[in-house]
């Protein structure tokens, strides 16, 4: 249910900064802020020009005490973030002014906004659809330039345009089928089936094309989970340090030692990498060995890339053979380390214990490893294709899953036609596809799902 009361939240991150912003939205936002605002002019905020900035102070009317000097931004609905009347109050960026102003608002019939409630209102008011709301989260959470530009194109409506276009074609077909159901004559049914069949082929093709790029989109959006495995002393920590030296992500640019940290973020080829050293998990968690190995397995199963570090300067140990077997057949790069000491382990020795994406020779201590990773990140994300623009690329797992299910329903419709099934079966399949696609944009989505989705936003957004 949609509530249109007036809400407010602190929109700037907690802490001290140049300015602090309190965002207010709802039908009474102008008069309420007006009752707390004092300026040289006497014209009330409601009568001032839209999209202007007003200078003044926030004053508690009960005590006449000035709380802070402010700038007030006026944005009348529907041309605002929420499509409601929005006022943004800019005060000095300390913790106290923003809190005091928010408190004052709450004492004057304003409710504290829930996480994501401003964006939810933009959705409820039809200003943006669900894919665009999700794009806003993605923009906020973007860790690389590529993931940012992907999110921006989604905000622009690339995904929704694609989905809406297919839905319109489907609904036209469904209508056509239903008319035919009402006038059941053998030959009309045949003609209709043939027509629908022809129209569905290009739709299915475009969905296939989109899904073919979905994994690329997902990796750009979510990054690559990279897991480092190997026996103690193989050189895992040295590798992690070598990789971080060149690629440490700006978002986690914390100075200091990296040795023995178990998780790090870095950027390679414009892709965010989440690097995990499984040995660290075993070391730092004070649990039985079995549990450590169990955890390593969990990470291996979730990994997009596995870096299996082997000491190439000494014969393979039983433990190394066991590790190799457990990562065989996955996206594993075997790194034969310590090449500076001379290698006695050969590619054939490794291949005896499984199939691997690549076997590379490095000296982690000599700072090597980055070039290997860059090459395989490129391969994994773009699959040999050249890096292209992000037009109509789906990246969100929710969208990918719904798109796959919708495609399944369309394929079902096609096989119903081929099997000579009554056309109401075909209509039902197409309706299913139409609904699933509507879940992507939020046109047919359930309320519980909407709440769940918006709760992932931060406060003030
Ligand atoms: P981990 O236990 O797998 O994390 O291994 P470390 O990274 O801690 O390395 C174990 C030992 O091997 C350390 O003494 C490193 O200096 C050494 N080491 C790591 N990589 C190389 C390498 O490429 N060449 C040589 N000669 N020694 C290395
Ligand atoms: Zn280590």
Image (cartoon, grey):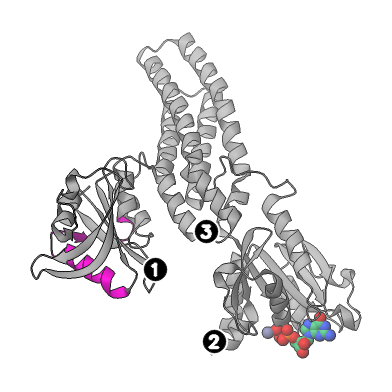
Q: Are marks 2 and 1 in contact (CB under 8 Å)?
A: no
Q: Name the residue: 33% across, 73% down.
A: 94
The reply to whether dot 3 and dot 1 touch (C-beta < 8 Å) is no
In the foreground, 139 or 40: 40
Q: Judge whether 450 appears above or below 38 on screen.
A: above
Q: Position of residue 50 (x, y in %)?
A: 27, 43
Provide residue 363's location: percent of width, then percent of height. Answer: 82, 77
What segment is highlighted magenta in the picture?
Answer: 95-117
Q: Is residue 213 left or right of residue 378?
A: left
Name which of mark 3 and mark 2 comes first in the sequence.
Answer: 3
**Residue 142: which numbered mark, if any?**
3
Q: Position of residue 58 (x, y in %)?
A: 20, 64
Name the one closer to the observer, 159 or 270.
Answer: 270
Mark 3 crowdedness (10 Å alpha carbons): few <14, some 14-19, many ≥20: many
Q: Secondary structure at mark 2?
A: loop
Q: Residue 285 got which mark?
A: 2
Q: Earlier in the sequence, mark 2 or mark 1?
A: 1
Q: Is mark 1 within 8 Å of ligand 2?
A: no
């Amino acid at each position: 249910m949609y509530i249109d009361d007036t809400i407010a939240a602190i929109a700037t991150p907690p802490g001290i900064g140049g300015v602090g912003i309190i965002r207010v939205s709802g039908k009474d936002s102008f008069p309420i802020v007006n009752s707390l605002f004092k300026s040289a002019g006497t014209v009330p905020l409601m009568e001032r020009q839209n999209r202007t900035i007003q200078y003044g102070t926030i004053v508690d009317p009960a005590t006449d005490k000035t709380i802070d000097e402010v700038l007030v931004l006026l944005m009348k609905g529907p041309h605002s973030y929420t499509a409601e009347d929005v006022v943004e109050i800019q005060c000095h960026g300390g913790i106290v002014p923003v809190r005091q102003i928010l408190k004052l608002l709450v004492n004057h019939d304003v409710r504290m906004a829930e996480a994501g409630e401003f964006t939810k209102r933009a959705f409820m008011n039809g200003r943006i659809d669900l894919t665009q709301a999700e794009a806003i989260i993605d923009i906020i959470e973007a860790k690389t330039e590529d993931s940012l530009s992907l999110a921006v194109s989604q905000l622009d409506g690339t995904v929704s345009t694609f989905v809406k276009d297919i839905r319109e074609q489907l609904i036209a077909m469904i209508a056509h089928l239903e008319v035919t159901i009402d006038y059941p004559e053998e030959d009309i049914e045949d003609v209709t089936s043939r027509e629908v069949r022809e129209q569905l082929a290009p739709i299915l093709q475009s969905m296939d094309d989109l899904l073919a790029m979905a994994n690329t989109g997902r990796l750009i959006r979510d990054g690559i989970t990279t897991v480092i495995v190997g026996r103690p002393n193989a050189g895992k920590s040295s590798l992690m340090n070598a990789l971080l030296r060149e690629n440490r992500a700006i978002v986690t640019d914390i100075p200091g030692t990296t040795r023995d940290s178990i998780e790090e973020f870095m950027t390679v080829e414009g892709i965010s990498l989440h690097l995990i050293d499984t040995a660290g998990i075993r070391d730092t968690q004070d649990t039985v060995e079995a549990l450590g190995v169990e955890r390593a397995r969990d990470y291996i199963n979730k990994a997009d890339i596995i870096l299996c570090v082997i000491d190439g300067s000494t014969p393979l140990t039983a433990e190394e053979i066991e590790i190799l077997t457990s990562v065989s057949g996955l996206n594993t790069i075997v790194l034969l380390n310590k090449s500076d000491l001379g290698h006695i382990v050969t590619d054939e020795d490794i291949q005896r214990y499984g199939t691997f994406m690549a076997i590379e020779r490095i000296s982690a201590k000599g700072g090597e490893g980055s070039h290997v990773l860059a090459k395989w990140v490129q391969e994994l994300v773009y699959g040999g294709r050249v890096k292209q623009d992000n037009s109509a690329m789906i990246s969100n797992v929710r969208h990918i899953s719904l798109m796959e299910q919708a495609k399944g329903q369309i394929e079902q419709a096609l096989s119903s036609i081929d099997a000579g099934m009554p056309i109401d079966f075909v209509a039902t399949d197409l309706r299913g596809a139409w609904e699933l696609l509507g879940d992507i944009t939020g046109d047919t989505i359930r309320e519980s799902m909407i709440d769940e989705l918006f709760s992932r936003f931060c406060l003030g957004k």
